[in-house]
Every structure is written in structure tokens, then in C-alpha cells.
């Protein structure tokens, strides 16, 4: 390896893409193409970066398997950053296997971190945790240790283990300080902000207040009956009843929870849940049917009693009822939660992360764009969507809940 290639590689490792380009900008050999591609990625020109890396893969000889594998890993990182979550995981896994077979432990570990971050983005926390457990960060340089701790913090935040998340963020700060790479420092600062900004609203006894993630964790561990409007469940401790697929029942539970300990008149329930402006006997009959269904769903958690005016939620002696709501009530909140990370997303990547159809996501994006809440750039398959984060709020609880079995 010549001195210019060595100098460019060192500059990239230090987070100095312009310094790297000074060494290899005019060269077209395979190693130079690969380094130019990585430099362009660090500068944010992902389209040009992918072109250069693919040219480098073609330029490397078949015998140069390690160099080709490193290019594949770099391309996968670009795909992750640009939120192209549909890239072939098998290709990355094959590259990682090649790197491990040739003793390149650091790049092999980085490939695994990319897959862990992808699993975290799409809500497959169990798979991310299992893969992460196979890595020992003490053997890695500061930059990889930072990446490791950020992933640990991300999983802990999604699991609502805020103490573990804060410890991981503190370790990431130390590692990023040693690495001296501005981009890593910015990632750590972003993770720190998530822990120190409001994540939800508590609605109880007619009053509201904002909660941090650790406040939410404390609430869910308490004896209170929580109507969780972030995840569409009703829970008490470890007992959880999901109403995510029963929007009418959840709307009833939330309305009764916000009214607790008082009852809620039937007319108000009908207007709020069914949008009924003029109430007749058919509306009242439907309300009785839905209340009966909700009563059966919540029989292990709470009771619903009929009163002269309407209905009331009964949580049992010594237990209070609270509603946990999003900090900002917003239509298509889950879509906005992903876009709020500041990265540009394709509709296909959002569909994969949300577990929804691409057409459903596209309709949501069109609605948000019409309201001026999101913007797009590019055309056809290269079209990307972006929005600034909601100021002063973290969207961690707007993300889809971990899927069962994941």
C-alpha cells in the first residue's frame, strides 16, 4: 500500500474526509476509489459514494476478497444512514464471514454493528440484543466502542430501562472523547438529548404534566392502572392488555381513564368515540355492546360500572387510573417519529420499519406533506422524505412497540 493510500485511510479514520480526498481525489485505482467513496459518504453525498464503492468492488481482483468485503460493509453503512433498510442482509453477512476468515476482526465487528442498528430501527429488539451479546467491545478501538454503547443505549431506551441507557450513554461519551470524531460526538449528544427531553404526557384527575423517559419507567412499574396511548395498551405492572387492533375499545378506555374517578356521561362518550352529533337508540345500543366487549377485555385489570349518567372505570381499592399520552398528539405520529431522527427516509424503508404496506405509508406521507409537516426530494425510487424533529420533545415512545417474539 502506497503512502497516499495510507494517508487517506488515516484521515478517514480520524473523521477528516477532505484530508483524505487531497490524497486520492485524482486517482482511479481500486483502493483510491474505495477511499473516495467513503470520503464522499462522510461528506453526505451518498449517491456518489455508492457509485464509487461499486466501481471499487468491480476494480478489485477476485483474489482481493478482503478489500471487496470492506467495500460491501461501507456500502451497507451508507444504506443504513440513508435509511435504505431493504438492502440484502445476506450480502453483508457474507462479507462479514469473509472478513472474519481473514482475521479482520474490526471490520467484521463493524459489519455486525450495522446489522444490529438495522434491527433496532425496525423494532426487532430481541434479535438486536442477541447479536450484540456476541460482541466484546473491550477489544475494539474508541470509535467502535462508541457505536457499541450507542446501540446498547438505544435498546435500553426502547425497553424503557433508563438507568442502563444513561450508563451506556456515559460510556459512549468517554469513548467518543477518545475517538475525537465530530460525527460520533454529535450522535452521543443526540442520544443524551433523548434522555433529557419530555417523552410523554401524564393525564390524571383532569390535570396534565410532561414526563421524561425515566418518569414513564417509574409510572409503568407502579401500582397504577395505565391507559397507554403511546402503545395502545392498558396495563398494570406486568399484566398488559393490547387494544392496538381495537381502536373503538381503546378510545373508550382512554375516555374513561381521563374521566376517572368520575363517570363519563353517555352522550359525551358517544360524541367522543363515535363522533355522534345526534344520539338515538341505535347509538346507545352500540355503546352498550362496545362497553361489554371492553369489560371482557379488561376483566383481569379493572371493572366498568354503569351509573345513572354513563359509565365509570373501577381500578380496585388503592389503585389510581392514569392516561399516558404522547407529548404532542399528531395524526400519523409513528411516521413522524421515524422522520424526526433528521435522516431522509424512503417510503419503502418506512413501510418496513412500521410493518405496514408501502401504499399506506405513502398516503400518510402525502397527508403530512399537504399539511406542510414533511418534505420530499428526489424522484421515483430515489425519493426521500424528511422533517425537522419536534422541538423540545423526544419521539422514542411514538415508535412502534417491540413486536411479539422480537
Image: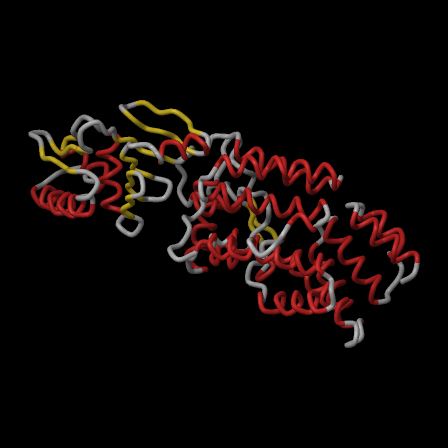
In the displayed orientation, state which residue is furthest to the bottom.
Answer: 62
Tally of numbered tags: 0
Q: Position of residue 99 (x, y in %)?
A: 70, 66
Front-most of residues 186 and 317: 317
Against 66, residue 172 (above or below) is above
Against 303, residue 208 (above or below) is above
Report the side of 102 relative to 226 (left or right). Answer: right
Report the side of 202 relative to 40 (left or right). Answer: left
Quadrant, the N terminus: bottom right
Q: Position of residue 225 (x, y in %)?
A: 27, 35
Front-most of residues 253 and 280: 253
Against 131, residue 173 (above or below) is above
Where residue 249 sits, quadrant-wise, is top left
Report the side of 248 relative to 184 (left or right). Answer: left
Against 65, residue 171 (above or below) is above
Q: Residue at x 47, y 52 (%)?
A: 125
Amino acid at each position: 500500500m502506497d503512502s497516499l493510500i495510507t494517508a487517506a485511510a488515516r484521515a478517514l479514520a480520524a473523521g477528516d474526509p477532505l484530508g483524505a480526498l487531497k490524497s486520492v481525489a485524482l486517482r482511479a485505482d481500486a483502493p483510491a476509489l474505495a477511499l473516495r467513496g467513503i470520503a464522499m459518504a462522510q461528506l453526505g453525498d451518498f449517491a456518489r459514494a455508492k457509485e464509487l464503492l461499486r466501481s471499487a468492488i468491480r476494480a478489485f481482483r477476485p483474489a482481493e476478497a478482503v478489500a471487496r468485503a470492506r467495500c460491501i460493509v461501507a456500502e451497507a453503512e451508507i444504506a443504513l444512514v440513508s435509511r435504505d433498510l431493504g438492502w440484502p442482509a445476506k450480502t453483508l453477512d457474507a462479507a462479514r464471514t469473509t472478513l472474519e476468515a481473514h482475521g479482520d476482526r474490526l471490520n467484521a465487528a463493524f459489519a455486525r454493528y450495522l446489522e444490529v442498528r438495522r434491527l433496532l430501527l425496525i423494532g426487532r429488539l430481541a434479535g438486536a440484543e442477541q447479536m450484540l451479546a456476541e460482541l466484546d467491545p473491550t477489544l475494539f478501538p474508541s470509535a467502535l466502542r462508541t457505536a457499541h454503547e450507542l446501540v446498547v443505549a438505544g435498546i435500553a431506551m426502547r425497553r424503557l430501562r433508563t438507568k442502563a441507557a444513561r450508563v451506556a450513554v456515559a460510556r459512549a461519551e468517554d469513548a467518543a472523547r477518545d475517538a475525537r470524531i465530530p460525527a460520533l460526538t454529535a450522535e452521543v449528544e443526540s442520544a443524551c438529548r433523548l434522555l433529557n427531553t419530555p417523552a410523554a404526557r401524564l393525564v390524571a384527575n383532569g390535570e396534565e404534566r410532561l414526563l421524561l423517559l425515566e418518569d414513564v419507567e417509574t409510572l409503568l412499574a407502579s401500582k397504577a392502572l395505565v391507559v397507554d396511548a403511546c402503545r395502545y395498551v392498558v396495563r398494570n405492572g406486568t399484566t398488559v392488555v393490547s387494544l392496538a387492533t381495537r381502536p373503538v375499545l381503546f378510545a373508550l378506555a382512554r375516555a374513561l381513564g381521563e374521566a376517572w374517578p368520575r363517570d363519563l356521561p353517555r352522550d359525551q362518550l358517544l360524541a367522543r368515540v363515535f363522533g355522534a352529533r345526534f344520539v338515538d337508540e341505535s347509538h346507545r345500543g352500540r355503546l352498550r355492546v362496545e362497553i361489554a366487549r371492553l369489560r371482557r377485555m379488561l376483566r383481569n385489570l379493572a371493572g366498568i360500572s354503569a351509573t345513572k349518567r354513563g359509565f365509570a372505570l373501577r381500578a380496585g381499592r388503592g389503585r389510581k387510573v392514569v392516561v399516558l399520552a404522547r407529548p404532542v398528539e399528531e395524526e400519523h405520529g409513528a411516521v413522524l417519529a421515524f422522520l424526526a431522527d433528521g435522516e431522509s427516509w424512503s417510503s419503502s424503508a418506512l413501510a418496513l420499519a412500521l410493518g405496514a404496506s408501502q401504499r399506506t405509508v405513502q398516503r400518510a406521507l402525502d397527508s403530512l406533506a399537504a399539511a406542510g409537516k414533511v418534505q420530499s426530494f428526489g424522484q421515483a425510487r430515489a425519493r426521500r422524505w424528511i422533517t425537522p424533529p419536534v422541538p423540545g420533545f423526544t419521539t422514542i415512545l411514538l415508535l412502534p412497540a417491540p413486536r411479539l417474539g422480537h
